[in-house]
Image (cartoon, helix red, strand yellow):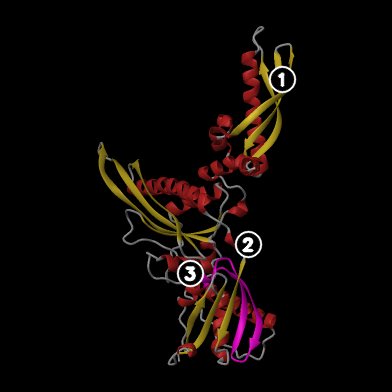
């Protein structure tokens, strides 16, 4: 009997192991299928004499290229294919076999000097998508951020860098920026026209921003039906910086005001290289240094340093040519980096619950709520519950509560402070503290 029990136990163990591996392999198979697309296509080859092997290989090759093309059409819009056809032809269509897991010839038919085959191919669609990102080809325009360029440029004859965001702005488009913007637009990005914004005049822009903030605050008050609260003047973030070299925070402020998702900030300079040919021809070098900053998180997501040397008889023309060349090269590299890393977090907005203590100080509470509404990435705010001296808010936010808490910590309030005393993944608790009083939970 013990031997029989031992044998039964071994059989049971073997069945369990086989079931485990069967389940594992089945799951792996399904996972692999999720990454592929089954496509049936026709391929044609030309028969030379009576030998059909070469014609069959030609027909298979044509069919596989057609399968990859079909998968690509299901992945990106046709206008994106047209705009990037040379890149796609060199990197996808000419290497179709790299994106085929396997294929099976279903039927073939020869008619005179033509051999036609009909095959089914398993196309690695996820590998195609990854390659498109590496090449900087967008999957759809909605996958890309709206971009603002903040470039301080100094050509050879310029005593100081020119820039558009100062109190005395320059209305001349920097050559490097013009070249970079063209590259980004070719790749499907939307670029903010800050020149059109400047034509309004800086005072008009500030007035428009103030009216927008006031209208937004009024709409918020109407939504929560809390009209008894006093009106508190909203602080307007500055839009003028008398400095050509902006920090990431300052550049993100400009991008936020101009409704850009991403700001590309940096410098471009041109100088003379000590190379000459004859009495008049000289070399000119441009250097471009850029970083891409997410407007919402105010974090760098990409960067590039690029230089280019051009030859000219004219000093200004040579500097301009070098700036344009360096700008296009830098723009191409940076656009590809951004396309690979950018995540459109705003498409799926999360929620953060905020418990606020100290709401009996009504003026400070209203100011805090408006400050929350002004945090980049916040798309909505609702009052869920009101109690004596506390309120619970639900905030639509495209990041987590840690990022929201960090944004609040960066804000300065005139008559009160904010004490964040509890922080979880989607919830935070804070207290409005008068400037000269300690938090109640510490007393």
Q: Does residue 269 sit above or below 350 in this rendering?
A: above
Q: Does residue 176 sit above or below 60 in this rendering?
A: below
Q: Secondary structure at mark 2?
A: loop
Q: Would you call the spot at circle 2 few (<14 residues within 10 Å), some (14-19), or many (20 or more)?
A: few
Residue sitting nearer the eye, 79 or 300: 300
Q: Earlier in the sequence, mark 2 or mark 1?
A: 1
148 with respect to 76 (left or right): left
The reply to whether the magenta stretch includes residue 396 is: yes
Q: Secondary structure at mark 3?
A: helix
Callout in the foreground (3, 2): 2
CA distance for labels 3 and 2: 23 Å
Residue 101, by quadrant, is top right
Q: Would you call the spot at circle 3 few (<14 residues within 10 Å), some (14-19), or many (20 or more)?
A: many
- The dominant secondary structure in magenta is strand
Q: Which residue is mark 2?
A: 348
Q: Which residue is mark 3?
A: 253
CA distance for labels 1 and 3: 61 Å
Q: Secondary structure at mark 1?
A: strand
Residue 66, by quadrant, is top right
Q: Would you call the spot at circle 1 few (<14 residues within 10 Å), some (14-19), or many (20 or more)?
A: many
Find the magenta span and give its range: 376-404
Callout in the foreground (1, 3): 1
The reply to whether the magenta stretch includes residue 394 is: yes
């Amino acid at each position: 009997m013990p031997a029989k029990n031992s044998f039964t136990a071994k059989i049971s163990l073997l069945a369990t192991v086989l079931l485990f591996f069967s389940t594992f392999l089945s799951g792996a198979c399904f996972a692999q299928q999720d990454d592929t697309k089954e496509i049936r296509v026709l391929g044609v080859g030309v028969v030379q004499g009576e030998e059909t092997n070469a014609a069959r290989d030609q027909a298979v090759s044509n069919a596989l290229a057609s399968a990859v093309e079909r998968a690509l059409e299901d992945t990106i819009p046709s206008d994106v294919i047209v705009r990037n056809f040379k890149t796609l032809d060199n990197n996808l269509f000419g290497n179709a076999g790299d994106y085929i897991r396997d294929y099976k010839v279903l039927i073939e038919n020869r008619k005179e000097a033509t051999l036609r085959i009909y095959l089914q191919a398993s196309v690695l669609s996820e590998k195609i998508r990854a390659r498109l990102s590496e090449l900087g080809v967008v999957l759809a325009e909605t996958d890309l951020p709206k971009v603002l360029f903040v470039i301080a440029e100094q050509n050879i004859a310029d005593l100081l860098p020119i820039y558009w965001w100062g109190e005395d702005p320059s209305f001349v488009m920097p050559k490097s920026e013009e070249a970079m913007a063209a590259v980004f637009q070719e790749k499907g990005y939307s670029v903010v026209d800050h020149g059109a914004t400047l034509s309004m005049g800086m005072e008009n822009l500030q007035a428009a921003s103030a009216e927008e903030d006031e209208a937004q605050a009024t709409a918020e008050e109407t939504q929560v039906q809390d009209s008894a609260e006093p009106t508190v003047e909203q602080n307007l973030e500055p839009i003028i910086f008398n400095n050509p070299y902006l920090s990431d925070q300052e550049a993100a402020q400009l991008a936020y005001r101009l409704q850009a998702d991403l700001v590309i900030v940096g410098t471009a300079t041109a100088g003379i290289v000590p190379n000459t040919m004859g009495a008049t021809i000289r070399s000119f070098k441009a250097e471009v240094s850029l970083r891409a900053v997410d407007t919402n998180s105010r974090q760098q997501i990409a960067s590039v340093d690029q230089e280019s040397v051009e030859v000219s008889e004219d000093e200004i023309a040579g500097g301009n040519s070098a700036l344009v060349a360096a700008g296009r090269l830098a723009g191409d590299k940076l656009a590809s980096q951004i396309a690979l890393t950018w995540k459109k977090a705003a498409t799926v907005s999360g929620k953060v619950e905020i418990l606020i203590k100290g709401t009996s100080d009504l003026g400070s509470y209203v100011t805090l709520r408006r400050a929350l509404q002004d945090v980049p990435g916040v798309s909505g705010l609702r009052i869920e519950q009101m109690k004596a001296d506390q309120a619970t808010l639900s905030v639509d936010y495209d990041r987590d509560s840690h990022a929201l808490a960090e944004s609040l910590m960066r804000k300065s309030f005139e008559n009160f402070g904010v004490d964040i005393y509890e922080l979880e993944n989607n919830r935070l608790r804070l207290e409005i503290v008068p400037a000269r009083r300690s938090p109640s939970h510490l007393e």
